[in-house]
Image: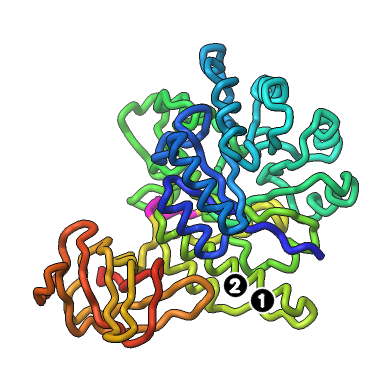
Amino acid sequence: MQKPELLAPAGDLEKLKMAIIYGADAVYLGGEQFGLRKASKNFTTEEIKEGIEFAHDKGKKIYVTVNIVPHNEDLEGLEDYVKTLYDIGVDGVIVSDPGVFSVIRRTVPNLPIHLSTQASITNYETIMFWYNLGIRRVVLARELSLKEIEEITERIPKDLEIETFVHGAMCISYSGRCLLSNYMAGRDANMGDCAHPCRWKYYLMEEKRPGEYFPVVEDEKGTFIFNSKDLCMIEHIPELVKAGITSFKIEGRVKSSYYVATVIRSYRMAIDEYFKDPQNYVFKEEWIHEIKKASHRDFTTGFYFGRPTEEDQVYTSSTYIRGYDYVGLILDYDEDNQIATVEQRNRMFVGDEIEIFGPNKDYFTQTIEEMWDEEGNKIEVAPHPQQIVKIKMERKVESWDIIRKGRED
């Protein structure tokens, strides 16, 4: 068995570096043009170049999204853009539109092209159509079961890679083809500007009773009838591997660096543990408990084990579950005095109980007994965004370790 690639999202440089440090084999990101995430910061060309250098230095890969469904004017500048991506060493681009694919093949024929989930690939004949045009990786539609994926991997050439989403937000409509945002908010999902109306609260109004709004269920709060649970397949690593999936993709380019680190860390540990001894592999509940310490909705296995039912929807709220806050990032550590230099991310107080974790190691818990500012003055609270503080640690820590604390609300 070949160990699958763990593919992480990145909305900016910090998230890219965090993903790689916490165990990602590759990162996908969007530039300032031609990508499908306007809500994330996205990358300038110089930032992409820096990200590539950081990744390649650690033997990792960078893929760039070029997956809009363009109108005529949206094609302007595409040739120059993909030439630049090729010149700075991008490992592949993710594409959904045949026209964009044609431009890239014509302009930079040696640049690897991955076919996006936006292309809605659901069968091996369509895969072979694209394979014969030169595609060597396909991101399958989310609407496939494991059985269907296995049927595909058994029929396709050995040099064709299959990538699937294993974690993150789900569309209520056919993935990538929803028109609700366009119709209700004038924001085009296929241009990266989805307003996520599937997460809104809906009521029923009868034609002859304008202005009278009825809950869709017997609940005075209404109901979030289109609100899908989040996909989470960490408990099913063996099944995913046996299905022949090449790359396990995590959704979330607009999520925080804390989210990226937390989710990637758990999947990294689960995958590595499985490949140590597949026959005797046992899933550890702590991996999913750790994931739940990042913001999330309740979880579902999506379409992997059959069509989702009413049990795969969240009817009560569209908000995330947030049990912990990301409060600090370790910048440096002095082993002689056990003092860590920390960049604050949310308010910390002396007396707070905190948890510290890092890549591929267990977390530990301690209380903040003392805290100092950059000038060495004792302080009781670190209230300023990205304030630099010093904290004594009960155990050795390293740069890029993360400090979190439980929320009181």
From the top left corner, tell me how far across and down residue 46 is, in percent.
Answer: 44, 37
User: Which residue is at 53% across, 67% downward?
Assistant: 265
Name the image quarter holding the N terminus.
bottom right
Instruction: Judge by depth and name the residue closer to the eye, 78 or 128.
Output: 78
Q: Gap between marks 1 and 2, in whole Å?
A: 6 Å
Amino acid under disc 1: Glu
Q: In which quarter of the image is residue 393?
A: bottom left
**Mark 1 — residue?**
273
Front one among 201 and 94: 94
Label 2 belongs to which residue? 269
Stretch of the chain drawn in magenta: 314-319
How far across and how far down the image is residue 43, in percent?
Answer: 44, 38
Looking at the rendered structure, the secondary structure element under dot 1 is helix
Mark 2, residues whose alpha carbon is within 10 Å: few (<14), some, or many (≥20)? some
Residue furthest top as drawn: 72
Residue 80 against residue 409 in the figure, above or below: above
Prevailing SS of the magenta stretch: loop
Name the image quarter holding the C terminus: bottom left
In the image, is residue 45 above or below residue 399?
above
Q: Mark 1–mark 2 contact, CB under 8 Å?
A: yes
* Disc marking residue 105: none
Q: Can residue 165 be seen in this view?
A: yes
Q: Is residue 106 in the magenta section?
A: no
